[in-house]
Image: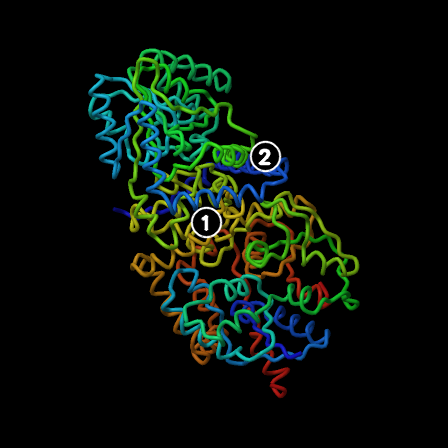
Amino acid sequence: MKVALFVPCFVDAFFPEIGIATLELLERLGVEVEYPLDQTCCGQPVANSGCQDDVAGVEALFVKNFAGYEYIVTPSGSCTHHIRHHFDAIPQTEEVTQVRERTFELVEFLHDVLNVDAFPWAAFPHKVGLHNSCGTLRGLRHASMSELGEPFFSKPVALLSKVEGLEFVKPSRPDECCGFGGTFSIFEEPVSAKMGYDKIMDHKNAGADYIVSADNSCLMHQKGCAERMGVDLKFIHIAQILNGDSA
Amino acid sequence: MKRIDHAEASSHFIAEKENEAFHDKRLWDLRMKRDGQRDDVPEWSELRDLASAIKEHTLTHLSDYLLQFEENAKKNGAYVHWALDAEEHNRIVHEILADHKAKTLVKSKSMLTDECELRPYLARRGVDVIETDLGERIQQLDDEPPSHIVVPAVHKLRGDVAEVFARTLDSDPANDDPHYLSEHARITTRPYFLNAEAGMTGGNFAVAETGAVVVCTNEGNADLSATVPPLHIASIGIEKVIPRTEHVAVFVRMLSRSAVGSPITQYTSHFRKPPDGGELHIILVDNGRSERLGMEEFWTSLKCIRCGACMNTCPVYRRSGGLSYGGVYSGPIGIILNPTTDMRKYSNLPFASTLNGSCTAVCPVKINIHEQIYQWRRILSEHNQLPFVKKAAMKVSGRILSDPKAYRRTLSATDAAMEHLPRFLLYTRFNAWGKQREVPITPDHTFHAWYLKNRGASS
């Protein structure tokens, strides 16, 4: 199985270790991974600002880089959601729709495509609060939504439960947005920060040592909040735990 | 018209720590109660489908059902008026009142009359309008618009209410006991019911097959407003019509559960005929609704039954308060309704959202609210309504991100001068990130550089 790895711009620039963990994890699972070198970004920040004209070139480049692969895997729920649901600034040719359909977020790729049933190399003896980003929760349907009252399911919980020693804590508002929201974090700074602070306290009060998520953009925001608040919480991407990276 | 600055307004709301904390908790409690009520209705999901389908059917046959409603309402002895816009609505109301020499109007809650700015219009013409819903009354006395479509004064603490009542109703300023305050409102409002020459209500539903107007309230004030004075005026947005009485049941099962987490409102009143010896006037108001119905991306926003569930669940609304939206409607539904009335004034609102989607998931009539918020951003951009800085930043970003070489140059420039990177990634107002958050530490190398170094040969 040949898979293209898409490392989102902010992971590339700020969190190379998440890209590395994703690559190594996929390789451990026997996947042949290619990293197209000319990749940049999915265009989400520009498209989410409404600027379809400005994002067209970014989308065209993305398709050029990733066309033809059986799967495109990325450690970002929010980018995957964007590509799957909003990537329409360019004509929807067969090539474009194929790239959109073949793009998978890492958790769903492991859970739904590879059906991974064990991570024998991974241990994480810590209390963990899971942060389901809104893009994964309501966009990609990683987990049951509290709004709908549907039977419980959670792909990230299913995967993390296979990691030795990991213990979940339960925040009181597990579905609440953390307030990152892309450019929202800048243009709506007061509310964004308040939501982040509230999220931090909810996890802290639940007894978490770590917050884990499939979206590091949320974690970047939450970490920034926790550090400013002086709250002792650590943040880790799910790829790093599943890859057995030492905490 | 000046653009509403939601971010600026929210910072003032958050600065009032006690109010903000109460506001967030109170509305989240409503959301939790709503979840509990939903669990008591096993067919909740089917009800949502049904409610949505009834609304979409009606909206796509709107003129037929409106005419049917008019015909049946007239048969019942009501007068039916049509108002194209707020101005015409207000003029009609005033003419009816003038015909009856009415100087005092008691009214129950109606977002539509707020939309039409009826109160100041009538005040200028010498008519005393008394809001009789407790929350609306508090807001009227404090000279503020409602901050929530169901609980209009939810942003106020009881101490705030005590202050307003002491100032305007001569209550004991030291007494902020809720029972005392509501009793005081009740005692001071009651004489208006008895003496007013006219009463006014809105309408939750207008039933085409019977010509009835259905009003749902918890305080009974709509029933008093409609039945005690000899003249009842009901103002209804044209999107409130539904085909049959049996359809009321579908919506009534969801309305109060979604709004405040109670199985039903205390009063669900069907007004069909004029009060004994009096008159019933029904005003069907368009005020931009027909135009909205013609908007491909946004017409389904007309399905809204004004339950406020989207506001209660919205993490942004809970932390910024309804007044920060600067319009009649606030929260997620306000974000998608207000720009249809004034695109420039409300051009910042669609950005006052993280697009988290919780609003869509609680909406009892399945309006894709967060998708419409996203669509509004595109429309605003197309109409050149983005602030210049944002538009310029997006242009530059688009150019860099579509050119691998330029992108790599930007990132490597960053290795030398780190501060460019966040600016590039986070666009403008860079300082906003660092006001209350630490900036992430830039690592020694990008993933790209690591890959070239460690795996370069194989690619």
Q: Chain of mark 2?
A: B
Which circle marks residue B33 in the picture? 2
The foreground one among A180 and B66 is: B66
Residue contact between numbered discs 1 and 2, judged by CB atoms under 8 Å = no
- Is residue B373 visible to us here? yes
The foreground one among B176 and A92 is: A92
Q: Residues within 10 Å of mark 1 (few under 14, many from 20)?
A: many
In the image, taking residue B257 as reference, residue A55 lies left or right, namely left
- Is residue B18 visible to us here? no
Residue type at numbered disc 1: Ile
Secondary structure at badge 1 equals helix
Q: Earlier in the sequence, mark 1 or mark 2?
A: 2
Q: Position of residue B256 (x, y in %)?
A: 52, 32
Which circle marks residue B369 in the picture? 1
| Res B155 quadrant in image | top left
In the image, taking residue B339 as reference, residue A74 lies left or right, namely right
Residue type at numbered disc 2: Lys
Q: CA distance from mark 1 to mark 2?
A: 22 Å
Scheme of colours in the image: rainbow
In the image, taking residue B33 as reference, residue B191 lies left or right, namely left
